[in-house]
Amino acid sequence: MIEVKAIKRLENLKEEENLRFRQFLKMNADPDKLDRQFKELHNKYFKIYDCSKCRNCCRELGTVITEDELDAITKTLHIDKEKFKKKYLEEDDDRYKFKTKSCQFLNNNNCKVKKCLPKSCKDYPFTDKEDRLYSMYSIIGNASICPVVYEILEELKKEYNFK
């Protein structure tokens, strides 16, 4: 298992290699097969890693929430919706994003809104979704944040005999 403290350093060492791997996949991978591989590896590594011990994504990525999610969150936290919006959020088209990068719901590695987690949080790092071949830039970026994504990329390189 990769330590969260080491993930950014490790990914910085692999960034150029990962960009070459992305290009290799674009030229050689079957998109459907790659999606299956990602999903299998996603399931494998999320059995090993415990997100609640990491929460690096909560510290490093901004969360976006919809109006419905905002309603659920403010109700769960017993906070006035308008005050919450003014203090923490910016409007972004038909949803909201936090003014700060670090999630406002994280408290000592505990998520205060676990019961009504926004979809963007539930779905992260998106490695079990379709069309992974066409989102490799974001996957490579997420490898510097999420140990699972880093592990998946390294295992895929082995499966494809990428050097």
Image (spheres, rainbow, N blue to C red):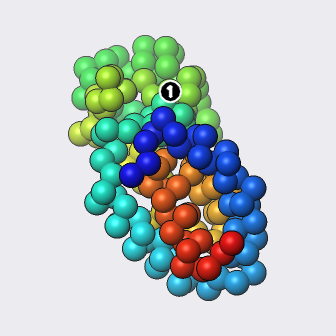
Identify the residue under disc 1. 102
Location of residue 54 in the rendering, given as x and y in whole percent from the top left corner: 38, 39
Q: How many marks?
A: 1
- Image quadrant in which you'd find residue 14: bottom right
Residue 93 in the figure: left or right of residue 6: right
Kindly identify the amino acid type of the residue bearing the numbered disc 1. Answer: Ser
Residue 44 in the figure: left or right of residue 27: left
Question: Is residue 65 in sight in this rendering?
Answer: no
Where 55 sits versus 37, above or below? Answer: above
Residue at left offset 70%, top offset 67% = 22
Residue at left offset 62%, top offset 85% = 30
SS assignment at label 1: loop
- Image quadrant in which you'd find residue 116: top left
Which residue extends farthest front? Answer: 163
Residue 109 in the figure: left or right of residue 124: left
Residue at left offset 48%, top offset 35% = 5
- Check the picture and name the quadrant holding the C terminus: bottom right
Where 89 sits versus 141, above or below? Answer: above
Where 148 sits versus 26, above or below? Answer: above
- Image quadrant in which you'd find residue 26: bottom right
Q: Residues within 10 Å of mark 1 (few under 14, many from 20)?
A: some
Location of residue 18 in the rendering, given as x and y in whole percent from the top left corner: 68, 60
Residue closest to the eye, 28 or 32: 28
Residue closest to the eye, 74 or 40: 40
Location of residue 103 in the rendering, given as x and y in whole percent from the top left corner: 45, 28
Question: Is residue 58 in sight in this rendering?
Answer: yes
Residue at left offset 57%, top offset 23% = 99
Location of residue 117 in the rendering, given as x and y in whole percent from the top left corner: 33, 41
Where 124 sits versus 60, above or below? Answer: below
Residue closest to the eye, 41 or 122: 41
